[in-house]
Amino acid sequence: MRQFTRKTGGYFREIVGGRYDTISVALVTLRQRISFVLVCFCIVNLAIVARIVYLSLQPRLSDHDRNIIQQQNANLVRADLFDRNGMILATSLPTVSVYANAKDVIDIDDAVEGLRKIFKDLNFRKVKQNLGGGKRFVWIKRHITPAQQEALLSLGIPGIYFINTERRIYPDRNLLSHVLGFTDVDNIGIAGVEYSENNRIIRNSEPVQLSVDIRLQHALRDELSAGVVEFNATGASGIIYEIETGEVLAMCSLPDFDPNQYAKTPPKNKFNKCTCAVMEPGSTAKIFTTAMALENGKVRLDSIFDVTVPLTVGRHHIKDFHPQNRPLTTEEIFKYSSNIGAARMALQVGGQIQKQFYQDLGMFVPVRLELPELQAPLYSKTWREPTIITVAYGYGIAVTPMHMVVGVASILNGGLVLPPTILKNKNADHKATKRIISEATSKKMVRLLRLVVEEGTSRKAEVSGYHVIGKTGTAEKLHGKTYNKNSNMCFFIGAFPTDQPKYLIFIMLDEPKANKNTFGFAAAGWNAAPVASRVIRRIGAILGVVPDKDE
Amino acid sequence: MFGVNRLVLLIAVVFAGCGLFNFKYKVADLNSQAQELEREITRIQCDVKILSAELRYLTAPKRLQRLANRHMILDKTEVNRLFSLSEFKTRLNGRAHTVRVDPLQNLLVKVSAPKPKKLSATDARGQ
């Protein structure tokens, strides 16, 4: 007791008035202890209440659930590609991929043996090596089938996990391979529209609508393939183009590839001849030469040129493929595709105007199309007399088929240069500002092009009722430093209907061979022109062009 | 008085607590439903995508043409068989409908196609 009072004596003296009361001391001690317990109890309760309130205000999503939703949403991010009528050209489908966490794998040999049963084509040595490295994330296989997933789940290999992924699918396979391009394993566009519009496709959930029409594309590809077989060509390309809007309705390059299996495709098949291959346009360039000459005013339709004597450039003599052996008018030069006549017209106009004309047509720079695979033209920097002459009839300058299409469309649409596009309605608000020729010259050119189909070298392109207009061109291919007469590029570029040319067709056959139906000829009038005719026959109805029955 | 106040406060706290928990569970349930719906939407979107892709495979122009060639006698549309709607109506009104022909039967019966005309040597000249 003494010991107790000694410790707390001062305090008790205040309460009990200096008297050392044993009972009072015990009561005070008890009250102190109860207070202490109560305070502790309140603190604990307050903490519990605070936690309950905090939890009550939080959403009940677990981390696992949240991850699943985020993953599902994140995977379906690549927008679809549609054709101009809303048909799916490219879409992304949900798939499952397999990965391993090497730290969770108990027995690597067992795991690899299990995987071997399901994935026959896997590089097991590499998988084993990766698992042995102790990495936390090792890809096993991407885009497995549901059956494979079920088999793998039933094996229950520790450390093997699944992840939701998406895979890009191209339902039409080869049909639009060069236009659409493809994506890599991480779903990033690496070719075609998939590459050029990659940001838009990823950021925007709305589908990207292209200007192409798969019905026209199919007709074009079908007829081009038939043409390649019929004329034993090494390749072909074709474009269907809407003249007023600059929209590409179909674009085909053969050989092509299946974008679903682009890794197994040889590189030459991935080459888009429509926008990447530069080639001398041959006689189709006479469309530009004649339009330029008529627009310039130095040449009229009835102007006469002497084409009886071959033109000499250095040690080369320029001759006509269809010699008439008499002076020809401008109209006849165009109709008979006279090289000498075209060269004389260009010489009369002059090199400076010719070069400026080609520059205004955009023949010196790559076309502005929404594709990454674009090639710049090849041309001589020094524009002297030999260049003037050769360019006049389609040599000495190499451009892509798309350049030819844009150039001819500019001449047929009244003289306005409109940039081409592969996206629907992109040019709807775009007004062409650059005028290359007058409307009067444009009408003259339409008349001349009709004359070529009626009486000239493109007669086989005619489709009764549609009044096709157009021009053929045959250019010898350059092998090394010399031209090979037996190796031609054959073109047809034309449009229909004549009254108001609306749709432009370009056909190119690479190294077509003569056969008995062509009577030994391998010129464009015998191969490219009939292919164009067949294409127009098929697409006329699809495009809703009513044929003229009064013909 | 002090005791009554305490009692009222205690009752209010109890009611507030119950209300809070009730509110919390309702929100949590709704959240759960929303989450379920979200999953369902994603699943249906995936299904729609798969079905759309399947439909596109089935309606691919190449496949349709192959099937048409195998099962029907449809030929490529000839230009001379195309008319504008007004012209078609005029023709239809001017024709007497005496014989009714089943169009499906016409499509399914094989007919001999006309042989392609061979090119003559005169066509060859001037090309």
Image: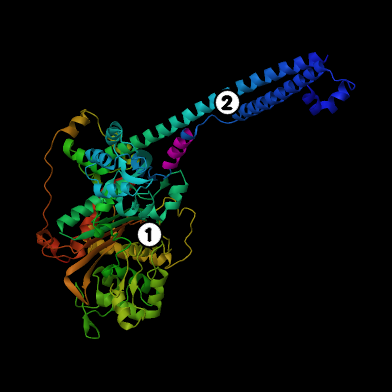
Describe the element under mark 1 as helix, strand or loop.
loop
Q: Quadrant of the N terminus of chain A?
A: top right
Residue farthest right in this picture: A17
Q: Which mark is residue A372?
A: 1
Q: Do the residues labelled 2 and 1 touch (CB within 8 Å)?
A: no
* Amino acid found under the numbered disc labelled 2: Val
The CA span between labels 2 and 1 is 51 Å
* Amino acid found under the numbered disc labelled 1: Pro
Pick the front one: A391 or A262: A262
- How many other residues sit within 10 Å of disc 1, few (<14), some (14-19) or many (≥20)? some
Q: Is residue A73 magenta?
A: yes
Taken as a whole, is the magenta stretch helix, strand or loop? helix
Q: Name the residue under label 2.
A: B27
Magenta part of the chain? A65-75
Q: Mark 2 lies on which chain?
A: B
Residue farthest front in this picture: A2
Residue A226 seen in this snapshot: yes
